[in-house]
Image (cartoon, rainbow, N blue to C red):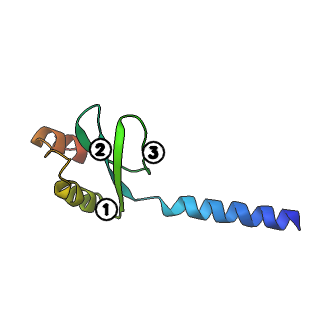
Amino acid sequence: MKRLIFAGVLLLASGTLSFADGLFWVVGNRATGKCNIVTSNPVIIGDIWFGDGPYKSRADAKLARSTIRACPAPTPDEEKEEDGTN
């Protein structure tokens, strides 16, 4: 019986972790004074002063970042770095 319960807990935990795949969060970084888009659920501590999300796509996260007053608009160079283009 204990093995069955243990197996159920492991299955539930692994299923919960897989839901986070492909999600994006907007994170405010106090040290840099910028807002970044990250792919893992942020821990609000230290320089990270807020986290907003999750969003289903990077485009949704970018749109949300543009509506958050505390987030300065990214420069064109920063946008290129995020997109991975030159």
Q: Quadrant of residue 76?
A: top left
Q: Which residue is mark 1?
A: 57
Q: Pointer 2: residues within 10 angstroms few (<14), some, or many (20+)?
A: many
Q: Is residue 23 left or right of residue 69?
A: right
Indicate the position of residue 28 as horizontal and vertical percent values: 29, 44
Tell me the amino acid under the disc marked 3.
Val
Q: Is residue 73 above or below residue 23?
A: above
* SS class, disc 1: loop
| Foreground pick, 20 / 44 | 44
Q: CA distance from mark 1 to mark 3?
A: 20 Å
Residue drawn at point x = 15 percent, y = 44 percent: 72
Tell me the amino acid under the disc marked 2.
Gly
Residue drawn at point x = 35 percent, y = 51 percent: 51
Q: Which residue is mark 2?
A: 28
Q: Residue furthest toward the top?
A: 31
Tell me the amino acid under the disc marked 1.
Ser
Indicate the position of residue 61 as horizontal and vertical percent values: 27, 58
Q: Is residue 52 left or right of residue 43?
A: left
* SS class, disc 3: loop
Q: Which mark is residue 11?
A: none
Q: Pointer 1: residues within 10 angstroms few (<14), some, or many (20+)?
A: few
Q: Which residue is mark 3?
A: 43
| On-image quarter of the C terminus | top left
